[in-house]
Image (tube, rainbow, N blue to C red):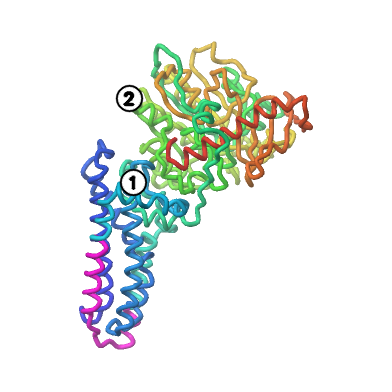
Amino acid sequence: MKQQFHKPLFLFKLLGFCLLFLFMHRLLFLFMFHDQFNDVYFLDYVKAFLIGSLTDAIASIYFLLPMWLILLFGNIENKIIKYTSLTFFGFGFFAICILNLSDLGYYPITKKRMGAELLDILPEVPALLSTYLIDYWYLVILLLVFFSACFYLFKKQIFNYKNNLESIKVKLINYVIVILSFLFIARGGIKDKPFIPFDIPVIVNPKLQWLASNTPFQFLHTLNNKNIKIETYFQEDEAEKIIGFQKQFVSKEFKKKNILFIILESFCSERIGLLSPQMNGYTTFMDSLLGNARTYKYVMANGRMTIDALPSVLSSIPSFMDKNYCYSNYSNNNVHGISSILEKEGYSTAFFYGGIKTTFGFESFTNINFTKQYFDQRDYDSHYENEGWGVDDHLFLPFVASKLKTMPQPFCASLLTLSLHHPFPIPEPYKTLLDSIKDPIKKSVKYTDLSLQLFFSKIKNEPWFKNSIIAICADHNSSGLGFYECNPVNEFSIPVSFYSYGDTSFNKMQDHSISQIDMYPTVLNYLGYNKPFVSIGSSALSANNHLTIKYVGNGLFHLFDYPYALEFDNTSKKTTKFWIFNDKRSIKEMVIDESNQKKVDELTDLVKAYIQVFSYRINKNQF
């Protein structure tokens, strides 16, 4: 058998040598930055190194692919084959080493493995090379040692290789074994989708995600991802002052109430009777709840999809890019969102969604930025059979209520519903009960309203409920019902509301603007959190920046500060439109002239500041 499969065993041995050297790279990374991996169990390290071996194998296959192909299909005893394969090995492995080791100098700054963004700094290399060589001389020595040792080992193996006599049939079998094995490794298994950096925090402790990854692997998976350009409209500290990025609320006491974020699937403003009178009768419970809460009339979502909502609501990360944040090469950034703040104050955390964890990368995002305690369809019932997107809300929401009852207090939890979504399935007995409603959207609205009523009936008598604040919003706008005028504000219009049991001073309807990125700063302000933190969103309870800003694509940003709205083109660096919005939800475009130039300039500076702070901070991993 050893003679029959001589070549596959030889190639697997060479791959093993690659993994051995990259294992040493990982040990070096752990040695240099071990103080950043606090409160981690030994088994977490074991898991990180095992997944790290997979990322090393993937990088080795791709970076050394020409060598593998030449060795597999060529006659290795041939002198030209030996030197050609060794040449490709030299280029490929040198690239692996230089990426892995050079990134050790950047990690303390970026707090992440670098990806294809390394290409962006190539023009700066000549100017920085001498300084880098002086400051990181030991990495240069390690690069030469690692590369020389591995090159010597590979050269020895290749030049000592002896062919075995093989029949055509055996050669074909060997080809198939190697190709299928390497494809299996390169994909990271036989899953529907290849293994990518965003999958790592689901498997390993998020604190160890960069230990488990490697720079060549990160580089491969971000080649097609474009970094957004860092804008420089102002001095950086000036831009941050304009939007109030650095925050600290004045308060004598931090009231550690429980916090629950409820993110409603597609429940835009137009679908709520309190905000859209034509829907009276369909949202009876929601109208009552929001009417007794601090509800904001003029709200715009910060994105178009559910995948945009979680970063906005839980981490104050707006969707300012053409690519969704969760699928961008920033998705593994370490964001200091609300859970990172509150866990230091003794809060427990949990996330609830009735679908599957892997939907839209929700689990990966929450693992990094909110919580590892994620309850989904399988936690409700591992054998539940979907008819729609997951467990029906009238079943899953009571399950959430039962879990919240057992959570250590204080807690910060988030619930994402799923009913109001095409194809709008209504389960029994509600399907029969709501049979008189013919419009599938209105029927689904009513069903969601009844499910929410059921949820609140389960929690309203719980002790935690009476010591809590509940922040409610929709994830995004959705197809209109024709009740609102189609305009740039209404197409992103969603509800945002804050309910605090027994606080009658906190239940007034508000006219000024707010968006999803403002929700957690508002919650922290209300609770009296008085330590410094950073957030691109602002508290709706403060006196400044009662506005919303969204990216609509192709370089265009819309800012809304009731009743004003404008469009800014970040490509041409100009404000292109200016509108006045009224309480009838209609909008009028205004000619920009002397009468409104001052207001336009003021709002334009705000847009520029938001764009600059976002572009700088997300590229530097400093949110």
Cα separation between marks 2 and 1: 24 Å
The answer, for residue 550, to whether it is visible in the render is yes
Indicate whether 337 appears above or below 23: above
Q: Which residue is mark 1?
A: 209
Q: Dot 1, crowdedness within 10 Å: few (<14), some or many (≥20)? A: many
2 vs 1, front mark: 1
Main secondary structure of the magenta stretch: helix
**Nearest to the observer: residue 310 or residue 118:** 118
Question: Residue, x 60% and y 36% (percent of image)?
Answer: 550
Query: Residue 111: x percent and y percent?
Result: 36, 42
**Nearest to the observer: residue 53 or residue 558:** 558
**Nearest to the observer: residue 587 or residue 132:** 132
Highlighted range, magenta: 146-174
Label 2 close to label 1 by CB (< 8 Å)? no
| The disc label shown at residue 346, or none | 2
Q: Any magenta on residue 195?
A: no
Secondary structure under badge 2? loop
